[in-house]
Image (cartoon, rainbow, N blue to C red):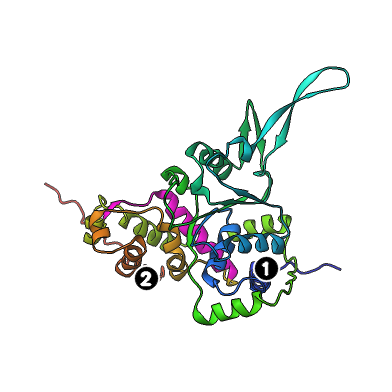
Amino acid sequence: MSTKPRSIGDVLQEFAQHRLLMQQELQKVIVGQNDVIEQLFAAIFTRGHCLLEGVPGLAKTLMVSTLSQILDVGFKRVQFTPDLMPSDITGTNVLEEESTGRRNFRFVEGPVFTNILLADEINRTPPKTQAALLQAMQEREISVGRTTYPLPDPFFTIATQNPIEQEGTYPLPEAQLDRFMFNIKVDYPSAEEEERILAVTTRQEKVETRKVMSAKVIVNVQRLVNSVAVSEYIIKYVARVVRATRPKDPTAPEFVRDLVDWGAGPRAGQFLINGGKALAAMDGRFSVSVDDVRRIAVPVLRHRISTNFQAQAEGLGTDDLIRRLLKEIPEPEIPKFVSAATQKAPTPPPPPTGG
């Protein structure tokens, strides 16, 4: 008996239900933070990396470790400190002696060989160690000596940093910041959420979460999300938004030229489209809308735009400028459909006149 093949609409609806189940499981442990959870899901389903920023005590580490349990994937945490070496992350070659007396090197894997790597307080370690993550994040492989080792699939880096304490820290270089799909701000909970946190966490009850996915399922979901349709209309809108962040671009608004030092590169547009695909798929839709792009524009662009002294003097941050930009950038016009029957035939050229 042959089974009827499922349409992509049915598959997307099933995925949307799984996504809701994942969120329900995560919210057994994490109270609130709906936008943060949505952006984490969007990054995971599009092979992206995240940078979480928030003051201590907002459950950033707990959120990531719980997420790995729900997804049923490998999880490693590295506490970045000033004395951390690159080999502490990637692994190293160890000299071993066999029973015959022969010596050879054996590679011992570092914590980067996992599915979800939590780089805690990434700005507390020197640039040399931060750069060790660069190849892993972009190429999903690491090189030790003359050998290159592939990382497990899927692989995500989720880094955290404290925006308050700047003493003794090493700001991430622009090349590495650009590798992060999202820069996610984790804010304080609301009054109602804080009361729920206090009620739940002081009971000494252990919350059990269910496994909803697996590494293999995530890879299949990534393929599904990648197949979500993106119209030429959306591509034009994304290109307009990204180009408008660059002060030297002729299409940039006047306030961008006055308040911005440099804007976002082409990778920002790629992440806006990929993030839009993830949001559409998580809602059970198979095409990206302008609202999808607007929903993720702030976390995608906030670490790719540098404001100047005038903006800082006026108390304007990158988030304020991005929101203003989204209001001012018009949507591209949708060309009207003209059927072949209603199209006018081109006027023939006049016949040549004899001289």
Structural crowding at the residue carrying mark 2, measured as other residues with C-alpha within 10 Å and reported as few (<14), some (14–19) or many (≥20): few
Give the CA distance from mark 1 to mark 2: 32 Å
Name the side, left or right, on which 55 lies relative to 328.
right
Q: In the rendered view, tell whether residue 143 sits above or below residue 171.
A: above
Could you tell me residue 28's position as x and y percent?
Answer: 67, 74
Q: Is residue 88 visible?
A: yes
Which amino acid, mark 1?
Answer: Val
Q: First in sequence: mark 1 or mark 2?
A: 1
Could you tell me residue 98's position as x and y percent?
Answer: 84, 22
Structural crowding at the residue carrying mark 1, measured as other residues with C-alpha within 10 Å and reported as few (<14), some (14–19) or many (≥20): some
Q: Is residue 269 magenta?
A: yes
What residue did someone put label 1 on? Answer: 11
Residue at position x 83%, y 67% in the image: 2
User: Which span is picked out in magenta?
Assistant: 260-282
Which amino acid, mark 2?
Answer: Lys
Mark carried by residue 336: 2
From this viewpoint, which residue is outermost toward the left? 355
Could you tell me residue 288's position as x and y percent?
Answer: 50, 66
Q: In the rendered view, tell whether residue 181 sits above or below residue 324.
A: above
Name the mark nearer the viewer: 1 or 2.
1
Residue at position x 42%, y 63% in the image: 298
> Where the N terminus falls, by quadrant?
bottom right
Closer-to-camera residue (168/318):
168
Name the side, left or right, on which 282 lies relative to 235.
right
